[in-house]
Image (cartoon, coloured by chain):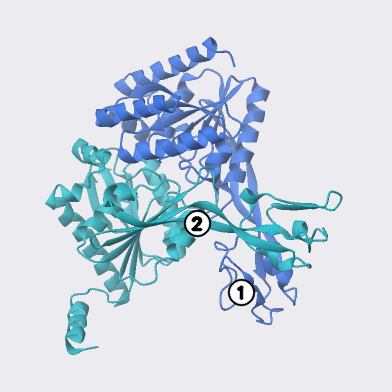
Amino acid sequence: MDGAAVADEAAGAEAGVPDSEMKISVASGKGGTGKTFVSTSLALSIDKELVFLDLDVEEPNAHIFIKPEFHEENDVGIPVPRVDYERCDFCGVCQEVCAYNAIFAFPNTRKVVVFDELCKGCGACIVLCPQKALYEVPRPVGKMRHGRNGKIEFYDGKLNTGEINTTYMITHIQKQVKEANLVIVDSPPGTSCPMIQAIKGSDFVILVTEPTPFGLFDLSLAYEVVKKMGIPAGIVINRYGIGDDRVEKFAEERKIPILLKIPFSKEIARYYSEGIPIVQVEERWKEEFRSVFEKVNQILEGKNA
Amino acid sequence: MLEIAVVSGKGGTGKTSVTAAFATLAKSKVLADCDVDAPDLHLILKPEIKQTSEFYGMKRAYIRLDDCTWCGICREYCRFDAISEDYVVDPIACDGCELCYHLCPEKAIDLKPTLSGHWYVAKSRFGTFVYGMLEIGEENSGKLVTVIRKQGLFLAQKEGADYLLVDGPPGTGCPVNSTLSGLKYAFVVAEPTQSGLHDLGRIIDLMEHFSVYPLVIVNKFDLNESVSRKIEEYVKKRGATVLGKIPFDPAVTESMTQGLSVIEFGSSPASKAIEEIWRKFEKGLTATPL
C-alpha cells in the first residue's frame, strides 16, 4: 500500500466511512409498503460503488428503477438425481432416505421415478445409494441476472412460474458477491425463511412500513425477526399522514430510530407508478436518502464505539 | 359452495381490504386467511378464537453434543451450510433433509419435528373464520395453507355456506401455489404501477399453470390512469377479465384504522365501487352456472 492510499484510508476512517464491508437490507413484514422504493432510492442517492441485490425473487422489481444494463443472464439450477440403470439394483434406499418424497424405486417394473419439482437437491439419495447408481443434473428453478448502472453493480433473480425453491435461489445470488464495500439488499416481504436468508449477515436492517394497523402488525412481526437475529434496525414510514400514529408510538416504546418519514403524496405515487425514481426528479429526496445512509452509519459507529 | 381466493402477486395492493369488504357483502360464507406469514384480516375481523391447533412442519436435525466426536462428516455433506463449527444446527438453514442423520457414524443426531405455527378456528361478526400464523422464520407455509383451506372447506360445507372466501398470500411462491391449486376463480387485486403490472403478469402465469381463471380488480386505478389502461389492455390480451376498478379513497385506510371494512364504514367512492364489483361477480355466477 502506498502513502496516498494509507492517507486516504485514514481520512476515510476519520470521516466515519467504514472501510470494511457494510450490508444494509431493506425489509418489511407487509408487502407493498415501499421496500423497493426505499432500497432503490437509497442506492441511487449514495454516490458510492455498491452492489445491489434484489432478493425478492418471486416479484423482483428493483430493475425497473435502477435500470441496469444486463451483461449476464444464467439459469439457476438445483441438482436433481438421475439413475444409471446399469448399476441400480432397485434396493429402495433412495426412496427410504428422501425426506421430500421425491424419489421412488419400483423393483417389479425395474424403474426409479424422480419428482423433480419436489427435490430440494440435498444429495441424500446420491450419497447414500449403496450401488452409487445415482448422478445429478441441474434442473433450472429460475434465472439470475447481473448488470450495472453507473456505480451500481446489480443482481436479481426471478423464480420460474410455480417454483417453490425461493430460498435456494436467494442463497445462489448471495454467493455471487465476492467483494464489496457496500451491499444493499431488497428483501422479500414476510418473516419466513426467504426473508431471513435475505437479511442474514446484514449490519443493519431498514424496516419499511406504513402508518396503518396492517402496517403496524406486520412491522411488529418483522421487528421480532431482526431482534432475534441481533441486527440493529431503523424504521422508514412510508405514506406518512394516512392512518394513525401507532407506528410512531411502537417505535418510541421500543426505542427504534425512525430514519425517515415519506409523506403520502399523489405525486410520489405517480412517479413510482411510472417507474421513475423520485431521487432523480427532486434533489431534495436525494438529500433525504443520503441522510438516511448517514444516520445508519452513525448508529453503527455508535454501536462499534 | 364456491371457494374463491383474493390474490395479488405484488404485496400491498389491497387484498385484505378487498377481502374484508367482500366478507361484508357476501351473505353466507366462511372466511380463511392463507397469508400465514403476515396475516392481517384478523385485525378487521377481531375474531374470538374457539379452537387453537398446533402445526408441526418438517423434522430438523439436532446434534447431541455428548455423543458427537467432531468428525466433521455432517458438516462436509450438508448442502445447506446448516451446521456450525461448534456443531450446532442452525434451525433456519436446516432444510430437514436428514442426510446428516443417516451419515453420522456415532448416531449422535436426532430428528425432531418443530412447532412451526398455529392455526385457529374462530367466530367473527362476519361468520366463521379460519386463520393461521407461522412461527418466525419457519418454512412450509404451503403445508399450513393447505391445512387452513381444508378446515375452511370442511366448515363451509358443514354450515351450508355459499362461499369459502380466502385472503391469499402475496407473491407467486409456495404458499400461493397452495392457495390457488384446485380453484376455479380467483380475484386478483392489481395496482396501476410498473411493478404492479410486472407482478400481475407473473400471477396470471401462475394461474394459467393451475387453470384458475383470473378476475382482475384494479385498485387505486386513478393514481395512474394510463398504467390502469395498460393493465386493462394486458388483462384482455391474456384472455382474462377486469371485473372492476376501485378509486383511490382515504376511506379505505380510515376504515382499517377503525377496525372496520370499508363497506361497514359507510358510503364512499371505494365502497360503491366494491359493491358494484361484488354485484357483477354474483351476477356472472348466475349467468354461467358453476
What residue is drawn where x is 29% and y is 78%? A305
Identity, as a three-letter code, of the amino acid under mark 2: Val
> Could you say whether the residue bearing mark 1 is in a helix, strand or loop?
helix
Are the two marked residues, 1 and 2, in contact with CB atoms closer than 8 angstroms?
no
Relative placement, left or right, of B176 versus A285 is right
Residue with the mark numbered 1: B75
For the colour cyan, the matching chain is A
What residue is drawn where x is 55% and y is 45%? B174
Relative placement, left or right, of B132 versus B159 is left
In this picture, is B264 found above or below B76? above
Q: Which mark is residue A186?
A: none
In this picture, is B52 found above or below A296? above
Label 2 crowd (10 A; few <14 / some 14-19 / many >=20)? many
Residue A115, horizontal then vertical, whole percent: 67, 49
In which quadrant of the rendered image does the N terminus of chain A lie? Answer: bottom left
Relative placement, left or right, of B184 versus A156 is right
Label 1 crowd (10 A; few <14 / some 14-19 / many >=20)? some
The Cα atoms of the two marked residues, 1 and 2, are separated by: 24 Å
Residue A285, horizontal then vertical, whole percent: 17, 51
Q: Chain of mark 1?
A: B
- Toward the front, the furthest residue is A86
Residue B17, horizontal then vertical, whole percent: 40, 31
In this picture, is B148 found above or below B221? below
Q: Chain of mark 2?
A: A
A57 and B187: which is toward the camera: A57
Residue B146, horizontal then vertical, whole percent: 62, 39
Identity, as a three-letter code, of the amino acid under mark 1: Arg
Residue with the mark numbered 2: A76
